[in-house]
Image (cartoon, rainbow, N blue to C red):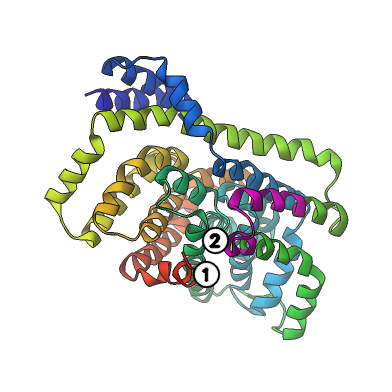
Amino acid sequence: MSVAITIAFFVVGLLGMPIAFALGFGSLVGLWMAGVDANMLPQRMLHAINSFPLMSIPFFMLAGELMIKADIMPRLIEFANAFVGRVRGGLGHATMIAAAGLSTVSGAAVADASALSGTLIPELRKAYGLPFASAVVAAAANLGPIIPPSGAMIVYALMAGPSVSIGGLFMAGVVPGLILTAAMMGWCSYVAWKRDYPLSGQEFSFRNIFNVMRRSLIVFLMPVTVIGGIIGGAFTATEGSAIAVVYALLIGLFVTKKLTLADLPEAMMRAAITTAIVGAMIAFASTITFLFTIDMLPKQLAELTRAITSNPLVFNLLIAVLLFIVGTAMESNAAYIMLVPLFHPIAMEYGLDPLHFGFLFVFNLVIGMLTPPVAVVLMVVQGVSGVETKPFMKEVWPFVWVQYGVLLLCMLVPPVVTWLPRAMGY
């Protein structure tokens, strides 16, 4: 009963306050209804955020902010254009490749949406019109939490516990991320041929690619160094995130020379605000998770799902439907914090691979960042471009279905997700 009341007051709280405070509001009411000593609230909150892996979130966010301020986008776009060559829909292809490159630095869809919108929409708009240009950028930004490093995967692993490795979850996103990039490039090609968009880009040449790589090698080595070190066991994800910050500073100050000391306070403030929001949500949600435990809600849900089906695939499909609904109505970090402690243990009872289930869970909620009404990526892109909602959504929905198609592939063919982590020893 206390859980139902907690969730009800959380939903009511969302109507008039930010998610973190709505969680706290619901937690207090639930604890009071359950007759639990309110002094337990600060203890649970401090225990939840006193986590070494959690420290990687602000560092990765700060590294992404610094790299964007270091003006790496022109180099990523130059490489993407050289790689794509002169083809119909080439600007869309270049956007997807540039977004994939940016994803290896930022790990967040909102940050990618902001960087890509300001840099690429003006050129895309000239060739494709504003609605399709905005849709291409919004869809490309969703690669941020899929291709490692990923803030979403860090939060998932933290909430799931020791059965899920951050490094393993990072590797689980590599192959699906590449497939997703190719699939969205395919849709860009189809639209370009159907609407007879002009050819764009320069002629393909290995010499051009080599020259671009040579000029920007030190920039491209950042994700190789950081992610490779995490996967190779040279350092933890938290230590790797700190190294990423130092690397970003060195590149911005001494290589691109676009980053100045005056830029640091703003970058640090943006990273701190985002981290504070995530930390507050984790802290308050820990009390709700505690109520779930004492009310034995995970056990009750496990029994209910077992009564519905004993087939792991059907269970995955049910979770996908649930997360589709949740993704339209709840911010993704709040969804991880609320739902992972409930459904991860049930998935383990079904014998599902923890990395496979974890990746599907993250991918589901990442797609939710494109589905209104709570679609933060769409809000960011629309805020920058000023595109009207109706034509924008008409162009976005095909990309959403492409992403769900890749999700279904990953669900039906688990080795797409698990092969690389297993090959790396996870």
> Residue 280, percent across and down?
51, 29
Residue 356, above or below 151: below
Task: Please tell me whether residue 14 belongs to the stretch shown in magenta.
Answer: no
Task: State the predominant SS element of the stretch in magenta.
Answer: helix
Left or right position of 5 against 14: left
- Label 1 sits on a secondary structure element that is helix
Which residue appears at 51% of the width and 69% of the height?
424
Q: In which quarter of the image is the N terminus?
A: top left
Which residue appears at 74% of the width and 48% of the height?
66
Crowding near the residue tagged with mark 1, few <14, some 14–19, many ≥20 C-alpha atoms within 10 Å: some
Left or right position of 3 against 82: left
Label 2 or label 1, whichever comes before in sequence order: 2
Labels in figure, total = 2
Look at the image and tell me whether residue 18 can be seen. Answer: no
Which residue appears at 26% of the width and 57% of the height?
317
What is the three-letter code of the residue carrying label 2? Ile
Q: In which quarter of the image is residue 124?
A: bottom right
Crowding near the residue tagged with mark 2, few <14, some 14–19, many ≥20 C-alpha atoms within 10 Å: many
Task: Please tell me whether residue 236 belongs to the stretch shown in magenta.
Answer: yes
Left or right position of 35 against 236: left
> Which residue is at the front of the view, 21 or 223?
223
What separation in Å lies between label 2 and label 1 (alpha carbons)?
A: 8 Å
Residue 228, above or below 82: above
Tell me if label 2 and label 1 are in contact, CB under 8 Å.
yes
> Residue 399, percent across and down?
45, 61
> Which residue is at the front of the view, 128 or 224?
224
Q: What stretch is highlighted in magenta?
A: 228-248
**Residue topped by disc 2:** 147
Q: In which quarter of the image is residue 413?
A: bottom left
**Residue topped by disc 1:** 178
- Label 2 sits on a secondary structure element that is loop
